[in-house]
Amino acid sequence: MTYPVNLSVKPEVSAHFDEATNTITYIVKDPDSDHCAIIDSVMDIDYAAGRITYAHADALIAEVQERGLTLDWIIETHVHADHLSAAPYIQQKLGGKIGVGEKILVVQETFGKVFNEGTEFQRDGSQFDALFKDGDTYMIGTMQAFAMYTPGHTPACMVHVIGDAAFAGDTLFMPDGGSARADFPGGDAGVLYDSIQKVLSLPDEMRLFMCHDYGPNDRAIAWETTVAEQKADNIHVGGGKTREEFIKFRTERDAQLAMPKLIIPSLQVNMRAGEVPKDKDGNPMLKVPINTI
Ligand SMILES: [Fe+2]
């Protein structure tokens, strides 16, 4: 696959860090028009109380409105397991199309079973406005963006490349954070390694924006790096680490990790493009499958 890389386009990137989930949401603006995209938004949940609020999404909406921008796209790099997407809430206020990787169908099939969803839960991706295949392009104002298929963390992961900026989703973390886990259903450490190599084959000077940062070793939260820095310094894949070394390390590490706190609500909401499921009477309601995940 040859991707339409174009480093001469330099989008303006505004980052919003969500402290509750360590997620970074991006507003990506075309320098030559007032059009933008939002990547990986967050809906706030107090899971213990069953309460959903929108402070993070409202801040994004306020910024888009204050800058007088038109929102073309609301992109999900994958079905997140650690936070809920606010895509439908943002779409209602600002418009734009919600896009995700076409392998969402695999994720919907897997978790449709886990959550024992009925036939009203469509497993065809129809909850989204666009399903991207490897190499698909789309426009944000005058900028051409493309999606790069990068499975391994989940089957539906995509890295989105917009000019000289790539949004890594959960393939890589900052160089001192390494890589994302590969032990969720449909995850695979070897496949993740191959996907990371694809990201690292982008030009050295490509800006790379992370979806998460946990500030390892007490450093300040950070989210921007480059392909060159990742190739040289990434603690899991940098300096020419082999596929075998990575698989061994990743598998051993993943066996030690606890489930993300919000995995159960996140999957139910995010496999529906950010809509909270409803019970038979039409009330928003979440399930907790026991001893299944
Ligand atoms: Fe993730």
Image (spheres, rainbow, N blue to C red):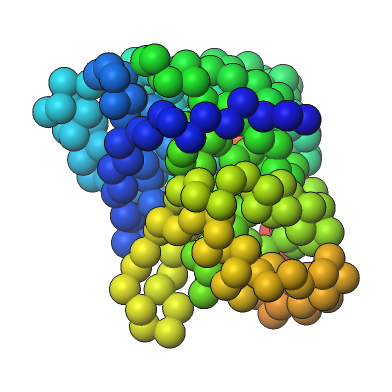
**Looking at the image, can residue 287 be seen?**
no
**Position of 226 compared to 1: left or right?**
left
How many labels sit on residues?
0
**Position of 274 compared to 249: left or right?**
left
Closer-to-camera residue (153/242):
242
Residue located farthest toward the left when viewing the structure as drawn: 66
On-image quarter of the N terminus: top right
Percent position of residue 85, x then y = 45, 39
Residue located farthest toward the right when viewing the structure as drawn: 244
Say above or below: 202 vs 141: below
Percent position of residue 60, x then y = 25, 37
Percent position of residue 20, x then y = 35, 61
Q: Residue at (77%, 77%) from the top-left corner?
A: 249
Q: Residue at (68%, 48%) from the top-left corner?
A: 201
Q: Residue at (82%, 69%) from the top-left corner?
A: 242
**Position of 156 compared to 251: left or right?**
left
Percent position of residue 30, x then y = 33, 25
**Looking at the image, can residue 142 be seen?**
yes
Say above or below: 39 vs 45: above
Q: Residue at (33%, 55%) from the top-left corner?
A: 18
On-image quarter of the C terminus: bottom right
Say above or below: 278 vs 241: above
Residue 36 image-quadrant placement: top left
Say above or below: 36 vs 208: above
